[in-house]
Image (spheres, rainbow, N blue to C red):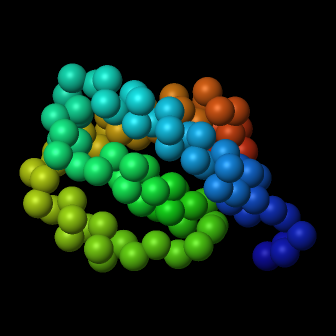
Amino acid sequence: MDTDQPNLYDSAGHNLEIDKVVEILYELILADENLKDTFKDINIDRQRRMMSKFISNCVGGKKYNQKYMRNSHSKLNLTEKHFETVMDHLITAMQRVGVSSALGVD
């Protein structure tokens, strides 16, 4: 493995760009009729911080506790459609920030 190559976390601009992506992501989620009720009783600022950590983990940043995430989501009765919709919004948010190319999701 070439250690001179930046990982996706480095290419995406560390937390600065990831935080912008997450901000747009939750604007899209909270405007989505199929998703917004899932987040009605959730501290959205905390949720944004957790999503930023999760995305950072996915692209090579600091590791995230996936067991905790699985347990917290299992109580929400989410479907595959919910996850697909969130992923669509995530791709849109990355495109708006301009990091989708670095992450290979154009």
Image position, residue 94 (x, y; %): 59, 36
Work out whether residue 8 can be spotted: no
Instruction: Locate the C terminus by quadrant.
Output: top right
The residue located at (74%, 51%) in the rendering is 13
Asked whether, in this view, residue 89 is left or right of residue 69, the answer is right
Q: How many marks?
A: 0
- In terms of image quadrants, where is residue 79? top left
Examine the rendered structure and indicate whether residue 19 appears above or below residue 33: below
Work out whether residue 62 can be spotted: yes
Image position, residue 73 (x, y; %): 21, 59
The residue located at (67%, 45%) in the rendering is 17
Asked whether, in this view, residue 73 is left or right of residue 47, the answer is left
- In terms of image quadrants, where is residue 88? top left
The residue located at (16%, 35%) in the rendering is 37
Which residue lies most toward the right here?
A: 4
Examine the rendered structure and indicate whether residue 66 appears above or below residue 50: below
Instruction: Locate the N terminus by quadrant.
Output: bottom right
Asked whether, in this view, residue 79 is left or right of residue 14, the answer is left
Examine the rendered structure and indicate whether residue 73 appears above or below residue 40: below
Asked whether, in this view, residue 4 is left or right of residue 44, the answer is right
Examine the rendered structure and indicate whether residue 63 appears above or below residue 8: below
Image position, residue 95 (x, y; %): 61, 30
